Image (tube, helix red, strand yellow):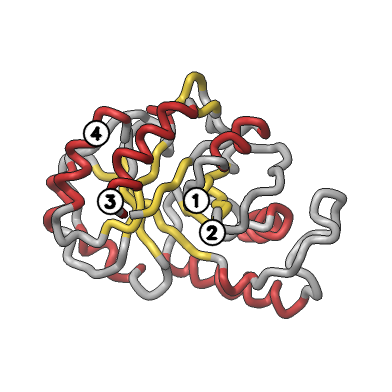
Amino acid sequence: MKLKVCGMKFKENMQQVAELQPDYLGFIFYEKSKRNFEGIIPELPKEIKKTGVFVNEYLEIVISLVEEYRLDAIQLHGDESVEYIRLLKENLQQAELDSASYYVESKKNRGSKRKSLNQVQVIKVFGIKDEFNFDLLQPYLEVVDYFLFDTKGKERGGNGVKFDWTVLEKYPYKKPFFLSGGIGADDVEQIQIVRKTNLPIYALDVNSKFESKPGVKKIEALEKFKKNVITNEVK
């Protein structure tokens, strides 16, 4: 099981979290979010996938930010349609053909090695509360790499509330997914239980429950959580 830490905002905190070796770091490009990111991403270990989180964003802006920040994954947290994702992938392919370099020519990216835009992962988010119609996912199966199930709430993520995980017992597909929504240190036992099911849970996505304030992650709490849930799984 992988670990994604989302809502990164401050350089020093990013570096501290990166030392814990999560598999994904999430950067939210959404102005209405308290964790909206507009800064510079420091050099991170190549094993960590930088993930851009977008909400009903213009395709041109998504492509531009993927190139500028060397993103490894795109997380779509809005009402993006299957056609939107198809066009996104086509635009990524075209940008790959048109550009001699993966990166935008800027001071922070100059000299970086090239990475193919065709390798960017696409994660589609769906909000769940007490029930969910999984038939809605069928059209997306061929266009996304992963689903992400979050709690349906007022905010587009970061609500700090869990949904009823038993709803996932009816998940009918083999497509792997991220489990998100208010996951905290107190959920270790429940995670161990759901991990023993046949559900294709690819990763845990954590955010607000490990913060001292929006965008600032508590390192010791994250380290302990990763050890109890992820590291122990390997053993």
Expressed as whole percent of the image width and height from the top left, the position of residue 122 reads 48, 63
Numbered mark located on residue 187 in the image: 4
Q: Residues within 10 Å of mark 4 (few under 14, many from 20)?
A: few
Q: Earlier in the sequence, mark 3 or mark 4?
A: 4
Residue behind mark 1: 24
| Residue 29 in which image quadrant | top right
Name the secondary structure under disc 2.
Answer: strand
Q: Earlier in the sequence, mark 2 or mark 3?
A: 2
User: Label 1 sits on what residue type?
Assistant: Tyr
Cα separation, mark 1 vs mark 3, equals 18 Å
Q: Earlier in the sequence, mark 1 or mark 2?
A: 1
Expressed as whole percent of the image width and height from the top left, the position of residue 201 reads 28, 56
Expressed as whole percent of the image width and height from the top left, the position of residue 165 reads 18, 44
Q: Earlier in the sequence, mark 4 or mark 2?
A: 2
Q: Are marks 1 and 2 in contact (CB under 8 Å)?
A: yes
Cα separation, mark 3 vs mark 4, equals 15 Å
Foreground disc of the pair 1, 2: 1
Cα separation, mark 4 vs mark 2, equals 26 Å
Q: Residues within 10 Å of mark 3 (few under 14, many from 20)?
A: few
**Could you say which is closer to the camera, residue 24 or residue 169?**
24
Cα separation, mark 2 vs mark 3, equals 24 Å
Expressed as whole percent of the image width and height from the top left, the position of residue 44 reads 65, 49
**Could you say which is closer to the camera, residue 65 or residue 227?**
227
Q: Is residue 95 left or right of residue 162?
A: right
Q: Are marks 3 and 4 in contact (CB under 8 Å)?
A: no
Foreground disc of the pair 2, 3: 3
Residue behind mark 3: 233
Residue behind mark 2: 73
